Structures are given as C-alpha cells and as structure tokens.
Amino acid sequence: MVGTVQESSSEEGHPFISIVVACRAIDSYANQCIRECLQLDYSRFELLVLPDYVETVSDDRVRVLPTGPVKPSEKRNTGVSAAKGEVVAFIDGDAYPDKDWLKNSLKYFDDPRVAAVGGPGITPQSDNTMQKASGEILSSFLGAGPLNFRHSAKLPRKCDDLPTVNMFVRRSTFNDMGGFDSSYWPGEDTKFCRDLVYRFGSEAVYAPDVVVYHHRRLLFRPHLKQIAGYGLHRGYFTKKFPENSRRPLYFAPTLFVLGIPALLLLGYVDESVRFVSLFPLIAYLLLIGIGALVIGLRRRNTNLVGPVFLGAIATHLWYGTYFLKGLLSRKIDTHTASYKSNI
C-alpha cells in the first residue's frame, strides 16, 4: 500500500501509527525528516507529508498531501483526516525522530487515561554555532527556567502543554475534540492540550525517551521572532485560557522588563539608593554570564559563550515585552499564513 511501511510480524497487534509531517516545502530539513522516519525501529506506521504545493517524493512509502499556504494547524488537521492510525504522531518539517521514537511512545498509551504523549526536542549536533546557542538558551534553566524540559531530556511527568513538534495523540480523542483550533499560531498546541486535560478530562504525559531532534532558529533575528510569537500568545492566553497559561513563571520576564528600568530610574533620582537599585541588574548579569560560561565549558565550545549571554538577555526582554503586549491586547492578529520557517 502506498504510504505504508512494510509491517514486521513481531509487531502484529501493536497500534498502527500515522506520522503527520507539516512543512512549507520538502526542503533539505523535510527530506531528512522523511529519511529518518523511514528508518524508525517500528514498522506499523504510515507517513503523511503536507507541503504547501505538489511535490514528488521518490519513495512510495510516503503520501504527499499538498494543502496550499495554510497555517500549520490546518495542515495537521488535514493530515489527521487522511490518517488511518489509532495514534497520530505530529512532527515538524524541521525536525527528525530518534530511531526509537514510535516504539518508546507506545508504553505510555497502555494507560487508557493517557490521550497525548510528548517529549523533548533536542538540538542536533549538526546545527551551527548560532543555532546551537539558540538551543542552549531554550534547553537551559538559564534561558527557560523550569520549562526547559521541553528541549532537553528530563524526568517523566504529567503535563498540560505539549508542543506539536513532538506530540502523539489518540486519533479518536483528536477527532472527538474537533482537532486543532486554527484560529491560533503559534499556540494551537497550548489550547489543544488545555482542552484535552481540563475540558475532556484526559491526561497528557511528557516522556523523556520520546525524542526528536529539532533544528533551531538562528540567533538573533529568527530566534527572537519566534520568541515574540510565543510571548504574545502566552500573554493573550493568560486571559483567555488561564488553566495552563496563567502561572507566575510566565510573568517573570515581564516583571524583569518593567522592574529594571524602574530600579534604574530610582537610582538616578536618589543617589542614596543607587547601589541598592543597581544590585538586581548586576546580579542578573552575573548569573547570566556565569551560566553562559558554564554552557561553553560543558560543550567544549567557547564560541557559544557570547551568543548565549547576549541571546539569553534578549530572549527575556523579547518574551517579557511581547507577553505584556498580548496581556494588554483585546485581540491578537492570528492570520499567520505567511509563516516563513518550515514550521
């Protein structure tokens, strides 16, 4: 059958999985994703690739479903509507799976309460220094705080927010929920998980052994553009979908953005408290600097130190500013069909 991998007799009775790859075009990253999917250590799956326009893939195990230039959420909904699997595995066109990706995910679905499983998106070794710096910021406590588990292998846990770069969902649950809300991008995965956990009463699990490798945006402009989108939607979702977005942690960068200028102004107008007012900023810069140095030494790549130091500060400023913008907005522009990354 076209689009289906030859099954192994030892896997009979195991769930059939539909892999849905959302991408703008079948470029070098998407081709890498396809190649690695076809080499997975599990054979009961089909591979659906959804570029904007008609493209040819030489391997007949791949089903190509052109969608036009629509949002990633619409591509994924289209993919699920064509899927045959009991479980749907979402991955982006700029990521590729570890060979045990499918096999490792299945044990978590042994619990009937679990409807979604996700895992880390790890920076590939092949990424260049500026991409790796972006990945280090996202995967370190220095840059992302306790949310760094999304980009590094941490302990398994229940959670209520999984990114679609690495998400498995029972197809029956997905259809019962009506799929992704295409009103939002980014953020459709946050809303989907919020609905799954708090409206439908199912469970979502973060699994550290369900791994994909996710090519990072370059520092600085592409990375910060992505961070701005995350901050804008999280700020807006704090009001609209508070169950998994109204948390103190998400407010921290905005407090930094507002607090530092206030302290500097206080020190300027009152010399008696100048040192005290500067201390939080000095302490912050020292912590970021030490953290960046530790990352450079641990990775044995001192070229990372400067970009990580500056990038972490810029990430906090951009996220905090756009979070505030989303928080204060009555509505946000959700028409993002002109996305420029390969999802």
Image: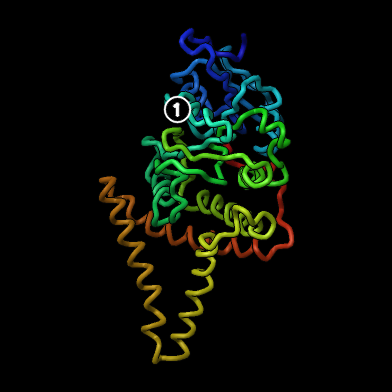
Q: Is residue 186 visible?
A: no
> Residue at the spot x=55%, y=42% of the render?
162
Residue 68: percent from left, percent from top: 71, 31
Mark 1 = which residue?
Answer: 104
> Does residue 54 sit above or below 227 in this rendering?
above
> Does residue 139 sit above or below 66 in this rendering?
below
> Residue at the spot x=45%, y=54% of the render?
144
The quadrant of the picture occupied by the C terminus is top right
Q: Residue 2: which quarter of the image? A: top right
Q: How is the image coloured?
A: rainbow
Label 1 CA crowd tier, 10 Å (few <14, some 14–19, many 20+): some
Residue 233: percent from left, percent from top: 63, 54
> Does residue 73 sit above or below 27 in this rendering?
below
The quadrant of the picture occupied by the N terminus is top right
The one of 167 and 212 positioned closer to us in this rendering? 167
Question: Mark 1 belongs to which amino acid?
Answer: Asn
Q: Residue 74: which quarter of the image? A: top right
Q: Residue 275: which quarter of the image? A: bottom left
Q: Is residue 334 visible?
A: yes
Residue 336: percent from left, percent from top: 68, 45
Residue 262: percent from left, percent from top: 51, 79
> Residue at the spot x=53%, y=45% of the render?
159
Q: Is residue 77 left or right of residue 145?
A: right
> Residue at the spot x=67%, y=66% of the render?
328
Q: Is residue 167 left or right of residue 55?
A: left
> Does residue 236 sit above or below 17 in this rendering?
below
Q: Is residue 245 left or right of residue 302?
A: right
Q: Residue furthest front?
A: 112
Tag 1's secondary structure?
helix
